[in-house]
Image (spheres, helix red, strand yellow):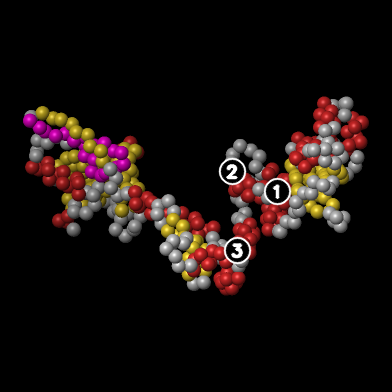
Amino acid sequence: MSRYTSIGKVNGVEVRILHDTGATPDLICNKYVKPHMYTNEEVWLRTPLEENLICLPLVEVELDCEMGHIITKAAVIRDFLDQGRYLLGNKTAALFEDLKTKKDAKVHMLIAVETRAQKKLLEIEKDGTQSVEQLDEKLNEITVERKEKRKRKRFYLWLKNLLYKISLKPLLKYLPKSKELKILIAEAQKKTYKVSKYVLENNMLFYKKTDEIGTERKLLVVPEKFREQLMIMAIKDFPTPTNKTQIRAFLDLAGYYRKYIPEFSVISAPLTNLLKGHCRKSTSGWNSSCRKAFEELKEKLSENPVLYSPNFSKRFIIRCDASNLGIGVVLTQLSDYDEEHLIMYLSKNFYLQSKSTVLQKECTAIIYAVQKLKCYFDGQQKFIIQTDHNPLVWLEKNSGTKPRLLRWALILQSFKF
């Protein structure tokens, strides 16, 4: 080992310098590095035993040994290097050889590794004068293909977490009998000059799709019957939110179906209260009421709602109710057999209105309902309002006492109920 090492000084400290290491850059341990030596540059290196690259910071090093004296840059490696040695890179060793043949060459700084967007100044002696050439160095280790490969790998891992398993036997049994897929199966079996995007493999129907980078994938075509099961599984397996961002994402998902969920705002009130504040990603004060609201919303979303289309030849019925948390509204109609059919659910949280009286809350629910359902009542359509207490009688008697009550009375004058 002695034939490959020599005694030298690195930043004034005597160490053993190891030659013929096969490494491109110089490597130095953290022991001989001080904070002011860092150059705010990094280098990407590949180790023989690992596929991934590692990023190491660069420091300025003054190297004095039997081969000569030079100022260079070395990569700092902390836990994988003997603390008593300095690894000499190939480029620095080659420069020392040049110094032996050209002793009059003046080298102020050697950048022995290639870094991103780094400039290197070379002093070249020409016709007795010195000229400076500026060269751009590029990072050869990282290529566009490797970046794309890593990006696709991360995407596949993310996509794998979103996939759900379904039983294959019921799917294979139901697929040939499916009326909605009958035309597509016939297209896949037909042999014509036109290439079909659908293909049958192992009695399963696939759709061939090409992505942006030209990769062809086969997507399994699932009938509507199984698709509904997958949607229910996705809702039931929704992970418990741990911060405000995840709570907001769940409420956005559930809010899309709020018209199918009675008293949606009242149920979700514990979750919406957690969103108060300016920090979006802070941890939330999750408690038992939040857990109950979260599970109840998931249960409501997985149920099959039964809503009917409105019949404008029949009279509408509005049911309003208010509590300390919010208001709930139901729009219904009576059928020819005197059965009440649901048409829509509405709800809203209380913020400032939570301090109002009971009658004021009931009036707020009525005003909110007629404004939201205005499209059903335009054209002089008559409707019925069902509510607790007598808020409309109270409003008629007290409409002149406050401007807000007067505005409510004027809004209701344009409707027939």
Q: Is residue 124 magenta?
A: yes
In this picture, residue 93 sits left or right of residue 277: left
In depth, the one of 339 and 400 nearer the eye is 339
**Quadrant in the picture for the C terminus:** top right
Residue shown at the point (15%, 30%) measured from the top left? 131
Q: What's the mark number on residue 258? A: 1
Residue 191 x %, y %: 45, 67
Q: What's the mark number on residue 180? A: 3
Q: What amino acid is at disc 2?
A: Ser
Q: Mark 1 falls on what kind of element?
A: helix
In depth, the one of 233 and 319 nearer the eye is 319
Q: Which residues are magenta?
A: 108-127
- Residue ranking furthest to the front: 193
Cβ atoms under marks 3 and 2 closer than 8 Å = no
Q: What's the mark number on residue 23? A: none
- Above or below — where is 181 with respect to 102? below
The image quarter in which residue 348 lies: top right
Q: What is the CA distance from the residue labelled 2 to the residue labelled 1?
A: 26 Å
